[in-house]
């Protein structure tokens, strides 16, 4: 996956975390390919880290972050047990990925 595109997704997640009222270092945000497309294109476990630090329920933290995920590249976002954030990306994300190979 292109570094610039992945960096953009991390930035979108970081802004959502801030909008939800949580504080984390941008370097704490790790976005990985999901094991199956049924769980999205990408997954992030940041809500688990935040919940542990604050003594809150991971799903509540994930739902709060998901509620602030707004960007044209995000087709769909959902909180999933035990506190993951699953992301589905717009087709244009992958179109730009393919252009790098041509």
Image (cartoon, helix red, strand yellow):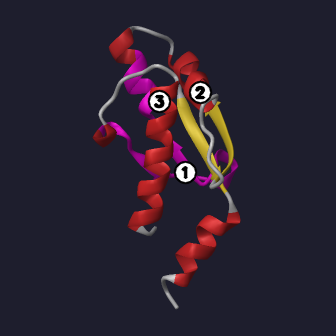
Q: What span is colored magenta in the figure? A: 28-51
- Using the image, determine if residue 54 lies above or below residue 30: above
Answer with the quarter of the image where residue 50 lies.
Answer: top left
Label 3 close to label 2 by CB (< 8 Å): no
Answer with the quarter of the image where residue 63 lies.
Answer: top right
Q: Position of residue 44 (x, y in %)?
A: 48, 40
Task: Tell me which label, 2 or 1, sits earlier in the chain.
Answer: 1
Q: Which of the labelled discs sits on residue 17, or is there none?
A: 3
Q: Is residue 61 magenta?
A: no
Left or right, 9 with reference to 72:
left
Q: CA distance from mark 3 to mark 2?
A: 18 Å
Circle 2 sits on which residue? 81
- Residue at x-position 69% and y-position 49%: 38
Residue 82 can be seen in this image: no
Q: Give the class, few, some or many, for how many residues have Cα within 10 Å of label 1's Cα (few <14, many ≥20).
A: many
Q: Position of residue 67 (x, y in %)?
A: 64, 28
Q: Give the class, few, some or many, for how many residues have Cα within 10 Å of label 3's Cα (few <14, many ≥20).
A: many
- Determine the residue located farthest toward the top in the rendered image: 55
Q: Nearer the viewer, mark 3 or mark 1?
A: 3
Q: CA distance from mark 2 to mark 1?
A: 15 Å
Answer with the quarter of the image where residue 81 lies.
Answer: top right
Q: Position of residue 16 (x, y in %)?
A: 52, 33
- Using the image, determine if residue 68 lies above or below residue 64: below
> Which residue is nearer to you in this view: 36 or 17?
17
- Residue at x-position 33% and y-position 15%: 53
């Amino acid at each position: 996956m292109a570094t610039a595109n992945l960096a953009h997704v991390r930035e979108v997640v970081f802004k959502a975390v801030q909008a939800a009222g949580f504080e984390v270092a941008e370097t704490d945000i790790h976005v990985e390919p999901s094991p199956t497309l049924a769980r999205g294109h990408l997954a992030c476990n940041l809500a688990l880290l935040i919940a542990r630090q604050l003594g809150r329920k991971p799903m509540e933290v994930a739902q709060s972050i998901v509620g602030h995920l707004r960007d044209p590249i995000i087709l769909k976002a959902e909180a999933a047990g035990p506190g993951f954030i699953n992301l589905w990306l717009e087709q244009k994300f992958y179109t730009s990925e393919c252009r790098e190979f041509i």
